[in-house]
Image (cartoon, coloured by chain):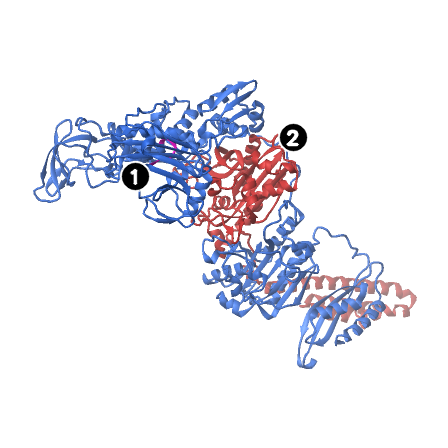
Amino acid sequence: MLERIEEIRAEAVAAIDAAGSSAELEGLRVRYLGRKAELTGVLRGIADLPPEERGEVGGVANKARKELEALLERATEAQDAAELDSQLLADRVDVTLPGAPPRPVGHQHLIARTTRQIEDIMIGLGYHVAEGPEVEHDYYNFTALNHPEGHPARMLQDTFYVQSHPDVLLRTHTSPMQIRAMETQPPPIFIVVPGKVYRRDSDATHSPMFHQMEGLAIAEGLTLADLKGTLLAMCQGIFGGERELRLRPHFFPFTEPSIEVDVSCFQCGGSGTLAGGERCNLCKGQGWIEILGAGMVDPNVLGFVEDYGYDAERVQGFAFGLGIERVAMLRHGVPDLRRFFDNDVRMLEQFS
Amino acid sequence: MKVPYSWLREYCDPGVAVEELAERLVMTGSEVERIEVVGPPSAQNFIVGKVLSAEQHPDADRLRVCTVADGEGERTIVCGAPDVAAGQTVAVALPGARMPGGEKLRTAKLRGVASEGMILAADELEVGEDHEGILVLDEALAAGTPLSEVIPLAEPVLEIEVTPNRIDCFGVHGVAREVHAISAAPLAADPWAEDVVAAGEGEASDVASVAVEVPELCPRFTARVFTDVTVGPSPLWLRARLSAAGQRPINNVVDITNYAMLLTAQPLHAFDLDKVPGGALTVRTAAEGEKMTTLDDVERTLDAETVLVCDENGPTGIAGIMGGQVSEVSAETTLVLLEVANWNGTNILRSSRRLGLRSEASSRFEKQLHPELCLRAQVVASKLMVELCGAKLVPGTIDVVGVSWPEPTRLRLRGARVSGLLGMEIAQSDQVDYLERLGFAAEADGEDLEVTVPPDRHYDVTREVDLIEEVARVHGIDEHLPTTLPAAAGPVGGGLSREQRLRRRAEDGLRDLGFDQVVGWSFTDPREPARLRIPFDDIRSSAVMLSNPLSEDQSAMRTMVLGSLLDVAARNVARGADRLALFEAASVYLMEAPPTGRNVGTETTNRPIGPLGGEFRGERAAPVAELHRVAALAVGPLGGRSWRGGGETADFFSVKAVLEALAAQLGAEIAFAPEPEPFLHPGRAAAVSLGGVAAGWLGEIHPLVCRAWDLDAAVGFEIDAAPLLGAAGAGEETYEDVTTFPAAYQDLAVVVPTTVAATEVRATILGAGGELLHSAEVFDLFEGEQLGEGRKSLALGLEFRAPDRTLTDEDVGGLREAIKAALETIGGTLRE
């Protein structure tokens, strides 16, 4: 009996060694370790042996079974691994082919992106975002902003009017929201107003529709110096932390004093000259780029909202307005304002 | 305003190069647009010469060979001017001179004769437009005298963009005062300080009279009369100065009026008094439709608000805007009436806009001049009339004061207010200096100043804050202002509103779904609704119309975003694009708030809403309804073509999936129902509702509309932002337990008549499934012969769950029977 067990074991070991596929190995498992296998029969028949043989035969048979089990497992594992390897090798793809189907990528319009960027900078400075109508009452666009009827300042902005409603117009700036906001909320107020504005002018540097960002801050004790600090923070946020400002006195009907603000050129660093020695094309060698208009809110404007808690002797503040297209053109080298409204996808897709 | 530097320096010489002055002007509030050099770029090699002889050129009829004394000797100059003659004193450019434009003059042979220079005409020096005759100079000038001692050469001219509040700087003298203020260089005596002696006979009122019928429109009218006037060309210096200032020299009388205006900012007008019958002038408003011909030879039709200066035969000029031809000064004129009047600025602005006629005079009058300026201009002009025209001033100034002008404004300038508004200190003594140099009177009273405003600043400086601006800008804002941020009273906690955050999310969502954002024109062609097949009585056909559009096809405000998207798509397709996925998030404009109902939102959105959902709304509602929309349009495949296939042209369902994904990103419940729109394929059009509120449309664009835009096919949607944001649950969700007890899943195949909508099947199942049926989604559609004519099979995946237990087969089996029964009521059967 013991010889027979050894014969089976040796035969099985040789067969496992020689097996070339996992199917073959599975056949061997059934043949040597299955329910009908001889070795299984031996183990099952141990009880029938004389008691003095049971121990030895049982021990040898069990040992042989365990050995074969272990051998089979190892061989199966090795075989599986080899088969997977060759399978994977056969599954090789050309990784340089494009992904399929291509997942379309949409693009944010440069105007929307620039608007958001500035909004976010101002939100960081503690401002809220207010939006208002584009078709507006003359009262909000002009009168309450200290452009009295018949005042030449109204001529500064060529205005579109609405047919058969002489007091209704397309807002020429985002400033009407200054008044609407102050009518709605008592001071302190800190808001920015993004949006479309319209002027009756069309050439390479003027579009009849464009976008502005208005800022308004009213509280006790705000100063022109605070305006400067706020604009510096904003411009550094837009154009980089190294930027400096230049303030030139100017005239706007709804601010007093009024200033125009230049930012130091971010291409030449304000020197007006590029590394190669040639004149900077962005600031035209000036070192400064005109970027926005601003000023301290005129007491006459506050007079229009006095009933809403805006007493010019108690609160004061500043306002500013900048052109979104201008910022986008400067930041991204867009040469012509009209490109923004052409919506050529070949341009849109340049800006992710 | 063009300010020749030599003229400016006559009143205030800052002693610096013009570029440096320009820089200083810019930094104190006067915008210098450019510095233009009038005349040759350099004065070198321009001299005075004497023509000793002028002979006919041997080989050219039109040329003369001149011998010219140049102070050192004689030289030969060939000259083409017919009027050159021996004995003339002339302007000569020697070889080496640079002509205006930069060209260098050389010795040249003209038809065989060497010309060692050039005898100059006025236009060659840019001191006038005259090219016909040479410039003949005062014969007292010695040959060889540098020409720059006679007229300014290489004259820098400051071109200043004067802001409309600074009417004083519309005159050279005002600019000189400004230069005085910012540089502290001395200011010369006022050019009107001393009046001329009246040497004429009689009294002005003997020969002329002025009646003002509309005093409120003509607060002051002054007139002086001059006899013995000799009209002729102005002297060279005057012509040069006017030319440099951009004014064409005409004759001495007209040039004098222009000169006085450019100096004082106060316009003047000269009449040939012999052509004014009886010397009687009347100021009145025009009759409606009254006509007159202005100096520019245009017949103008006037309205009842236009003010005229008339003689007894009718209008001789439009007040403050332009004179007429009737009494124009001509070569024969000997008797001149000089009008210097003050007009109501608002009226002038209105009339000049109405007539489309803007002149140097009207652009000044419209900004409201002070009546006291009248006599300044009279004095300046009178002196020149006597000096240059040999005229005699008739004693007496006719001075009709329609409205007496107010006392000078006195303002208190509080020291604390100056620093409180600016955030920087300016010493009181400096404040006084700055104000006095600007022409104000300032007297200290403790920390404060009592300030009197001069007449030239009367309408500009009316409040304390205006004075603060004056002292701040002269002090130097850029140089001295500290940089601070709002401190104690500063802003607290900025941010976006929920609606704004959701709108950003919606835009980002569409971008993530592969759509390119566009920004379309708010303007559109009023015929666009018709191109979209929208009926005339649809509210989308009554656009907000502009009264003064740039062009007819930009004269309406869009009532839909779709038109803009089609425009953009058509343009891109024409440029070769074959795959477009576009979206726009922007406003449309409707003349009236739309009625509640489909496509326009609910009662809550019926009001003209700002995108903020009412925040910062203000007292007066928006004049028209502005609705914020989100719209998208796809042309060609949504996903690109690939080596593994794909690239199917977008259709109703591919864009519907986009809109569903958008709604899902915002957590908004979305539903669709078949609903035709005139611009959509009638069988592939749906009304969209969000949170149960009508919100817009989704569909394939009607082939006829596509054809109108030269597109093969397109599919899109347009929804109001308000219901989208209103239905959005994103950010407001509450936790639901879906992990403790597992769900049970079952698929159902339902056969129904083709006419039964998928939503109806789904709603029926959900209704029958009750609370335990969590969801039912269609995942397959099958139509085939084995089902029979007019039937279709829908497959739905069902999810059952209970919050408090694991569902048993019996639970689900019971519900399945209930669902089966319910489906039978809509003609449906379950496929087992």
Name the spot of residue B665 as percent of width and height, x first.
66, 56
Front-most of residues B547 and A218: B547
Apparent colour of chain A: red
Badge 2: chain ID:
B
Magenta highlight on residue B519:
no
Q: Amino acid at mark 1?
A: Arg
The residues bearing labels 2 and 1 have C-alpha atoms spaced at a distance of 59 Å
Report if residue B158 is visible in the image: no
Q: Nearer the viewer, residue B758 or B553?
A: B553
Give the total number of marks visible in the rendering.
2
Q: Residue furthest right?
A: A51
Question: Which chain does blue denote in the image?
Answer: B
Q: Residue at x 12, y 40 (%)?
A: B64
x and y percent of residue A335 in the render? 44, 48
User: Can you say which quadrant of the picture contains the C terminus of chain B?
Assistant: bottom right
Quadrant for residue B779, please give it: bottom right
Q: Nearer the viewer, mark 2 or mark 1?
A: 1
List the residue tagged with mark 2.
B488
Residue B582 percent across, percent down from the top left:
55, 58
* Numbered disc 2: secondary structure: loop
Q: Which residues are magenta?
A: B263-273
Quarter where residue B747 is shown:
bottom right
Q: Is residue B131 left or right of residue B269?
A: left
Image quarter where the N terminus of chain B lies is top left
Whether the magenta-drawn stretch holds residue B270 is answered as yes
Q: Is residue A195 left or right of residue B37?
A: right
Farthest residue, direction left: B58
